[in-house]
Image: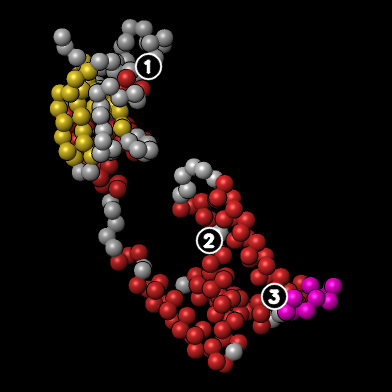
Amino acid sequence: MAGILAVIFIALLIRKSFFSQIFSTIDVKKQYATKLGLQLLFVWLIVVLGFFGFYKKNIYDYYFGIIYPLPFLLVGLTAVTLHRFRITRIFSYALVVGLLVFNWLGRPFLYQPNNQLGQVRGIAEEVVKKTENKPFNFALISGGNSDHAYRYFFELWGKAPVTIENEQVDQQRISVTDQLLIICEDISCQPLGNSLWEVAGFGRAEIEGMWDVSVVKIYKLRHYQE
């Protein structure tokens, strides 16, 4: 639908000589204004792609927000240009109809949601069950996700884990409980000896239990016994 709106928008600009009105004070013709508009779109594309070329970290979908309108404007301009000439007018109609069909077939409500909220809640419930209503420390080993979603449910149910403090703050090690519950979202998860502070701060440990829950693994660690 956004592509169709772009077609209408470009058509109105050209029909009403929008660019010609802007540059009328300096007597610039409509053809020059349209050419200038194409150049601006081209510069817009090149500059954004150039910035992404220099960016060496991970690129996420929302980074492209700066360039989202550009494809629609280009498609709209292409459809209007094809419509100007009788020999190519049929292709402009085909482009518009094709976009309508493509967008209709790809409508998002055709597919079931992934129910991430329900998954997180179910995993958090299993963690609480494994604690046997005793104080516990908690850690999440993941490729980049935050543990806030799990902690939200812990707080909601009044089962918040004990946060392990630095030895300089907690010299008596009161914040270290008898059990550490770990959620592993990483397939190659190795909880023992992991460098994550929530794991390393617990101290030397051994695995008491391991369970497959939904798309993760839950580990229960206890202090190592000689």
Give the residue at the far top of this rendering: 172
Q: Is residue 94 visible?
A: yes
Q: Quadrant of the rendered structure where residue 161 is? A: top left
Q: Which residues are magenta?
A: 23-32
What residue did someone put label 2 on? 68
Q: Give the image location of residue 59, x and y in percent.
A: 47, 48
* Image quarter of the C terminus: top left
**Residue found at x 49% / y 89%:** 90
Say above or below: 52 vs 145: below
Q: Quadrant of the rendered structure where residue 39 is? A: bottom right
What's the mark number on residue 124? Answer: none
Say above or below: 100 vs 119: below
Say above or below: 180 vs 142: above
What whole-number distance in Å separates the C-alpha atoms at marks 2 and 1?
A: 45 Å
Q: Which mark sits nearer the N-terminus, 2 or 1?
A: 2
**Residue found at x 38% / y 11%:** 167
Does dot 3 land on a helix, a strand or a loop? helix
